[in-house]
Amino acid sequence: MNLAVRDVRHNAGRFAFTTLGVGLLLMIVMGMGGIYRGLIYEATLLVDRVGADLWVVQGSTRGPFAEISRIPANLEDRVLAVPGVARARRFVSHTIQREHQGKPLRMVVQGLAWPDDKGEWVPIVAGRPLRQAHYEMIADQSLRLPLGEKIKLGKDVYEVVGQTRGLVGTSGDGLAFFTVSDAMAIQFDVPGEAVRLERAARRARVEAIDLGRLQPLLLDRAAGLASGIPAFATPQVSAVLVSLQPGADEAAVRSTLRTWPDITVYSTQEQKDLLLAGMVDKARRQLGLFRALLIIISTIIIALIIYTLTLDKIRDIALLKLIGARNTVIGGLILQQALLMGACGFGIAWWIGLYLFPYFPRLVLIENADLVSLGLIVVVISTLASLLGIWKALRVEPNTVLAV
Amino acid sequence: MTAPAEQTPAIEVTNLRKVYGRGHTEVVAIRDATLSVERGEIVGLLGPSGSGKSTLLTAMALINPPTTGLIIISGQPVMDGPRAMVDARAFRRQHIGFVFQKPNLIPFLTALENVQIALEINDTAPREARKHALELLDYLGVSPRAHNLPDALSGGEQQRVAIARALANDPSLILADEPTASLDGALGRQVMELFRKVAHERHAGVLVVTHDPRTLDVFDRILDVEDGAIRVRDKTATKP
């Protein structure tokens, strides 16, 4: 006869409410683990999907996911000349916050190296890849921009032609794909007045020197487009993505690229490691501490309720001792109740999470291995929580039952 | 030669003494008590409050060791002074049944399960324990209420279930501590008749601590406890 189950059935209401509370706490523990997994998944999704063998970034920087990286767009051509390189693509990534329909809209602008890259590799769930060099975009559904929606970014208006799901940056902002030139135009959009003032200033500086006065063309050039003056041109892309030829020696290509002092080269794995070791690692530690605290709180709650349930049964336990029940019967009763509470709480956590987590603003990814490890943690904390009740029960004297 | 277990007294107590405290605070609860209860015999233990009845009962129940004296149950020495000569809990499980003033049924078990648990604790297989528990409830006339929780039973029914639990492991000794105190006269009488039936039919020694003067006639013998000392009463005397 299972005494634990019968006692639980007798105190079903109290047990159910307590278990629900424990279940909600465990759901938060489970959710925090899921948020961490989601962070890793989201952070590495783009790096995985983009399909590059090597990432060429600004010298002495950790790449566009860790810090600002700016390299000249024409680095693409230099890289292509390295033996063993099959393809080089410009990569632009930066976060912007604009206003759309009266609400703030944050997005991670990603540049696709048009015309080689139209976004066919992007997991599009609705619509299509880019078909023209300008004014089209593929937006993640988290940005809430439906197909056909038009949005003004900088001086131009872009139309949503495709949608992705679950493609967000490390900060949780949805990704939006443009051609590299559009992405740069959005990034380096400068008000007309600022351009005019800058050009006037350059013209004035050139006029002030003899060379400027003697060479009218130089004066015109100084007052023209900044991109037309190599010395002034801003390095405009974040990285160059390198795909190697089949059978090419990656080490040899890297070795060649490392001799260039203006760049740093990373493999895809190194780029992912840098990503995870940076902001994701801090999030992991933060979430880990919260999880540890919540597990301790859950243990205390289970211990207190099991202790209270034990106190309620003191006379019954004394009676069991009087009629000869072994300590294993009495300890087993309490341990089984704690385990039952933990197991039911775990089940409730899983079940509620199943329906609730999809509504969270960030991806909550529950993996089977995490479920198993949390299950084992629940077994351990339930066992620990029962110790207080067992200690109390084993101290009860059988003659307690004789007290009227 | 050792007598067969069935022929030995259910319990023999020799020169039992229980002292609480020391020096100025010393209280002698039991003074050199000597008694025996034969199998098939029902014995009443009477005395005013504080006379030492309950102390004597708990000592015989192996839950309150005496200061000195010997306790033998079913021919087996079990306590020699404060020293237990057996595993007290295991011995209680196999040889002693208990009935209390309150039935003390486990509230989350049905009447049947309250009896069954006593059997399962003594390593009886669940199926067999259930069958035997039903037989005992039937013997005591409460089988129709077998599947009710204690809350749903009357006081008399609860006490019958408690007696069934006490009988579960076929004990040689049943100790009852004022089992009719919370019952009205007629019910109390019924319960005492049951004890008599159990003693005579199941060949157990039954020792009942009681205050109730209306049920004295059911006892085969009556022992009076006064200031911790025991004397045998003449059964023809009417004074409780």
Image (cartoon, coloured by chain):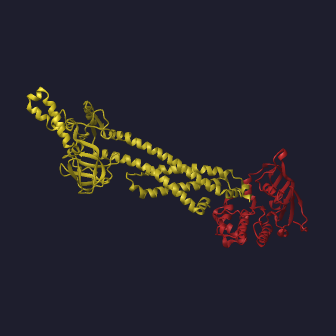
User: Where in the figure is residue B63, as x and y percent of width and height?
Assistant: 76, 53
Of A141 and A369, nearer the camera is A141
- Kindly tell me whether residue B207 is visible in this rendering: no
Chain in yellow in the render = A
User: Where in the figure is residue A358, as x and y percent of width and height?
Assistant: 39, 56
- As displayed, is residue A229 above or below residue B128? above
Residue at 66%, 71% in the rendered image: B145
Q: Is residue A320 left or right of residue B236?
A: left
Picture quadrant of residue B161: bottom right
Chain in red in the render = B
Picture quadrant of residue B172: bottom right
Q: In which quarter of the image is the C terminus of chain B?
A: bottom right
User: Where in the figure is residue A154, as x and y percent of width and height?
Assistant: 22, 47
Residue at 17%, 39% in the rendered image: A196
Of B97 and B106, nearer the camera is B106
Q: Is residue A214 left or right of residue A375?
A: left
Of A330 and A139, nearer the camera is A139
